[in-house]
Image (cartoon, rainbow, N blue to C red):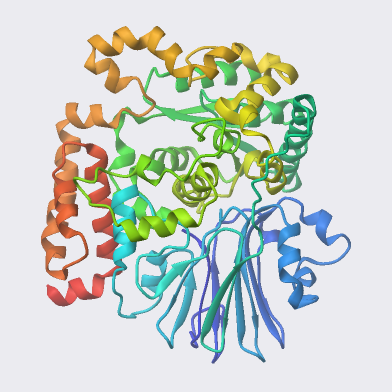
Amino acid sequence: MLSLYGRNKEMADWRISGPDFSFDLASNDKFPKDKLLFENESVVVGFDGVVLNKKKVIGNDTWQNYFLENLENLAPKLNNLRGTFNGFIYEKEVQRLRLFNDPCGAKNFAYEFDGTAFIFASSTLDLSNLSDLSRTLNPKAVYCFLAYGYLFSGMSWTKNSGRLPEGSILCYHNNQITCKKYKEFVYKQNHQRSKAQTMETLEALFSATIKEQFQKDEEENYQPFTTLSGGLDSRVTALYGHDLGYKNQVTFTCSQKGYDDEIIAREIAQDYGFEHHFYPMDGLEYLYDPEKMMHRIGGTCDYNNPAHVVYGIEKIWKKDYGLIHTGHLGGMILGSYISGKKELPPPLHASRVSTDLLPTDQEWEAAQRKQYQHEGHYKISERGFNSIAAGVWGLEHLSYNIAPFTHTDFIDFALTIPYDLIYKRRIYLEWLNRYHPEWTRYRWEHLHARPTRLWMAQHDLLYLRLRFGWRKLFSRKFRQTFDMAPEQYWFEQQPDLRKFLEGQTLPLLKIIRPLGIPYFDVVEKMARSKEVQLRVRALSLLLVVKIICKQQLFKKQ
């Protein structure tokens, strides 16, 4: 991961170095006019990322002055920005440092404080490269990762460290740390607005947000790069961009060969004249460099989840490409992750590993539930802004991921749509068929049918069982391979993958065992599991321990 970093110590080889604090920036080469790292007599300011509405918010002023004027007014200033970013302001006289990120946390920050030394960087793994501080694993982080496959909001791997929750400002002053949200997404259903008004507003928001993100490429003469699959979200982004005049898009798809994602995306790209690239996942190359991938994503989730997208885009990336336009979180924001038409409690149990393998930490899980109003709040905040976001973080060395669905204005409105309209994407599909029926002539991977018959989506499980159930009943291979990435099938059928995971994992178990890390017995069971996802999770965690605890391992050896 790439971003700003700093330490309350003089670092002679850093770009800005002083007796009280030093700062530097390691970033990609995209949108350099949006990046800042400068100092004057009183402050140091750093900013990394891309701001879609920068011209609008600064007017005739300068980007530097936007942050320098009225330093106490930081939260309203950040709320005005649309894009993906993080940054800091350091006031020299009072020695106050404030870190911040965007409302969705698409740009990450991790920090570490042992009572004396304060360090920040883009991830806990990066922190381990910036100092030789002694580190102890946080048992709660290990539990969370083993149970769910990713770290929850604010969690970091070591006891003296943390991560900024999305939409937050962290203040380090007088050896004290405080962290407050400057942006809280409000979940409040509006039952007074008609369905027609809701669709009209959705159409206006899609038009405005997609135009804003493609215009950013145009400002810098970049060629738009757009992911495209068999789903609806990336289709909406690419085709709305095309309708707005951005017809020179480069599109990218990855899946197993012959699956609907490949077929549907290729049909769309051919019909609309996009330069299209397809990465076939069947070769499994994306799984064979796990340590590099863990560094890319900051060690926050199972390495295989974002690896196919990161690896595939890396292979075809060119310097002329601009933003990475995606359908990121589209279905989630518009209803695919809720389980009913009414608000339900946060279902932490639904996505965790078996309690036979890892007994429940009742106190920790109860504390997590209290943070969330309901199922939608929990899933968007944790699975959306943390787990799925790892794919976003993994691409930062190339460019920045931008999606209309993660635009603050879009989320603010989407969270007011009543559950009976948003459940099973009802309003999304009705909007699509009413305003853009030409986009529905292509099949939708979720149903393997055109998204024109709303009853299919409302009764999707029944429809899929009727259409494919007999094949699943009689063919285990069909059950395993009817997927974009049938990794369990590949694991069972390809000895080289099994040998690779064993060759990576077993030596790490041997050298890490003397450290006595929390839940080591669970890690050993996962490493020998018949389920590939559990083996990958064990390897992912062991690689994190190897990176963070390298000093202890070196001493042991």
- In this view, the residue in front, 140 or 326, is 140
Which of the pair 259/190 is nearer the observer? 190
Image spot of residue 219 (x, y percent): 76, 47
Image coords of residue 36 (percent x, y): 66, 68
Circle count: 0
Point out residue 276 in the picture as x, y percentages from the top left corner: 54, 26
Looking at the figure, which quarter contains the C terminus?
A: bottom left
Up the image or down, 288 lies above or below 92; here it is above
Give the vertical position of 2 relative to 528 (above or below): below
Q: Which corner quadrant of the image does residue 115 belong to?
A: bottom left
Vertical order, 148 against 448 (above or below): below
Horizontal and vertical percent position of residue 61: 86, 66
Residue 184 in view: yes
Say left or right for 61 vs 136.
right
Of residues 520 and 47, which is closer to you in this image? 520
Q: Please give the name of the residue rendered at 43% of the width and 88% of the height, measured from the top-left corner.
A: 116
Query: Which residue occupies the extreme right position in the image?
Result: 60
Q: Is residue 291 visible?
A: no
In the foreground, 61 or 232: 232
**Residue 547 quadrant:** bottom left
Residue 256: image quadrant is top left
